[in-house]
Each structure stands twice: as C-alpha cells, then as structure tokens.
Image (tube, rainbow, N blue to C red):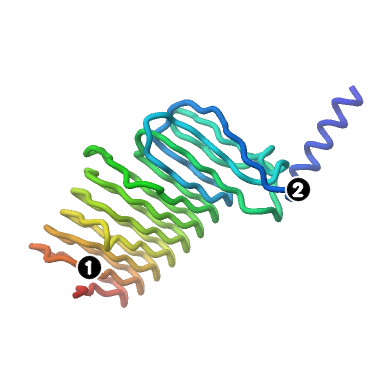
C-alpha cells in the first residue's frame, strides 16, 4: 500500500512540477495503426509525408519521449504529452507517413509541415490552428478546403482545390496565394490577414481591421465589411 501511495504521489508531483529535458537527443521508431488525420497539442515540430505504409519516428531527449504520446483514435493520430507539464527541453521532432490526410489540427505552439505534395484525390481537407502554431501544407486535387485560425497562428497553403473556406478570428495570418481555388469564401474577425488565389468567385466578410488580398480574375466578387478591413487585388 505504501508503494502504491508513493507511486501515486510521485506521479502527481511529476504532473505538477513538470518534466525537464535531460540527456542527449535520441531517435525512436514507433508502431502505429493507419490514420488520415492529425491532432497536435504540444510544442512538437511535425513533418508529414505521403506514403503507402503508416509510420512514426520521433526525436527528442529520452525522458521527454517517455511522456510523448503518439496514439491513434478513430483514424486520428494524436500527438501530445497528456497531463504532464513539460518544461525546457531540446526540440521534439515527429516524422509521420500516411497514405491519406484529410485533417490537421494544431493547438498550442507546435508546427506541422508537409514534406511532400499531398494528392487528395478530390477529397475534402480541413486545417485548423488554435493558438500560436504554424502550418505549411501543399495539397493537390482537393475538393473543398476548410481552414480556420483562432489566435496568432500562421498558415501557409499551396496546391489547388475546387473551393476554399477561410475563417480567421484574432491576429492570425493565412497565406494561400499558392493555393489556386475555384471559389473562395473568406471571413476575418479581428486583425488577421488572408491572402488567396481565386478563379471563379470571391466572397469576403471582414469585421475588424483584417485585410484580404487576392490574386486571379474572379468572375464575381461579393464583399461586406463592418470595420476598417479591406479587399485588395494583387498584381
């Protein structure tokens, strides 16, 4: 009983006081089930590659990797530290490979970057940042892309899609100049900025000081502003 109490106390102290990185950076290969969505809720740098077989490789200090969780729930890969408070440590890097990617969510200060151009085969795609994270993704042949930023995060998208919906609340920035879209619906609440590349129709609603810049020659433009934000065509 004493041992159980001690283990419970130590675990509680670990969660409360946090874990500080110790030792050299090592590499681990982890087994995984198939997944097509990624949630990152820590400070890791995640690199995503399209491939036929799912895989996960992590880099970091041993005691940090001991609390780093990479688990699949309902085809969604979740990368997090659980309830552990992780303090100062060397950068944690996670390299993942998966056959398909339909969703990427970032919460916190992590980053996600695609190592290849994702062929989405006319599937929908969702990208979301909550906090100060960064996302850089290249996608090809997507149907509808839904992107949202709440906070100060930055998102950069490239490739092509039939439709792009962008929603920014806060001071975040979405750069989609390199994502050629047929139809674009952009909404900004706050001071964030959005850049898009549109061919057919552009619909914009700004509430605050955020600006929308666009490339292309859309056949129709519908804009509504309830603040100082504007819509500007780039040459």
Q: Could you tell me residue 24's position as x and y percent? A: 72, 48
Q: To which residue does mark 1 refer? A: 214
Q: Which of 107/98 is in front?
A: 98
When the figure is inspected, residue 49 is found, relative to residue 214, above or below; the finding is: above
Q: Nearer the viewer, residue 112 or 74?
A: 112
Q: Position of residue 34 (x, y in %)?
A: 43, 27
Which one is in front, 230 or 157? 157
- Residue in the image at 23% along x and 37% along y: 121
Q: Residue at x 71, y 53 (%)?
A: 87
Residue at 37% across, 51% down: 137
Quarter of the image with the N terminus in it: top right
Residue 196 visible to an observer of this rendering: yes
How crowded is the residue under tag 2: few (<14 C-alpha within 10 Å), some, or many (20+)?
few
Q: Which quadrant would residue 94 be assigned to in this image?
A: top right
Residue 18 at least partly seen: no
Which residue appears at 34% of the width and 71% of the height? 210
Q: Disc 2 or 1, which lies upstream in sequence?
A: 2
Taking the image as shown, residue 20 lies to the left or right of residue 30, namely: right
| Residue 170 disc label | none
Q: CA distance from mark 2 to mark 1?
A: 48 Å
Under circle 1, the secondary element is strand
**Which quadrant is the C terminus positioned in?**
bottom left
Q: Decide if residue 215 is on the left or right side of residue 112.
A: left
Local secondary structure at mark 2:
loop
Up-down relation of residue 218 to residue 123 (above or below)? below
- Pointer 2: what residue? 23
Q: Residues within 10 Å of mark 1 (few under 14, many from 20)?
A: many
Are dots 2 and 1 in contact, CB under 8 Å? Answer: no
Q: Position of residue 48 (x, y in %)?
A: 43, 44
């Amino acid at each position: 009983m004493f041992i159980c109490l001690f283990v419970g106390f130590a675990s509680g102290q670990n969660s409360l006081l946090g874990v500080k990185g110790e030792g050299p950076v090592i590499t681990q290969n982890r087994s995984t089930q198939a997944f097509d969505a990624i949630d990152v809720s820590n400070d890791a740098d995640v690199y995503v590659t399209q491939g036929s077989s799912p895989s996960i490789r992590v880099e970091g200090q041993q005691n940090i990797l001991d609390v780093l969780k990479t688990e699949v729930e309902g085809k969604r890969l979740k990368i997090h530290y659980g309830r552990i408070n992780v303090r100062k440590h060397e950068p944690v890097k996670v390299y993942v490979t998966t056959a398909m990617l339909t969703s990427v969510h970032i919460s916190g200060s992590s980053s996600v970057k695609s190592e290849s151009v994702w062929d989405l085969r006319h599937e929908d795609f969702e990208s979301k940042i909550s906090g100060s994270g960064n996302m850089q993704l290249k996608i090809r042949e997507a149907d509808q892309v839904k992107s949202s930023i709440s906070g100060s995060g930055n998102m950069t998208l490239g490739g092509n899609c039939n439709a792009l919906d962008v929603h920014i609340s806060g001071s975040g920035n979405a750069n989609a100049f390199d994502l050629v879209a047929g139809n674009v619906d952009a909404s900004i609440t706050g001071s964030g900025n959005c850049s898009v590349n549109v061919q057919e129709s552009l619909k914009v609603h700004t509430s605050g000081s955020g600006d929308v810049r666009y490339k292309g020659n859309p056949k129709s433009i519908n804009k509504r502003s309830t603040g100082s934000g504007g819509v500007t065509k780039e040459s």
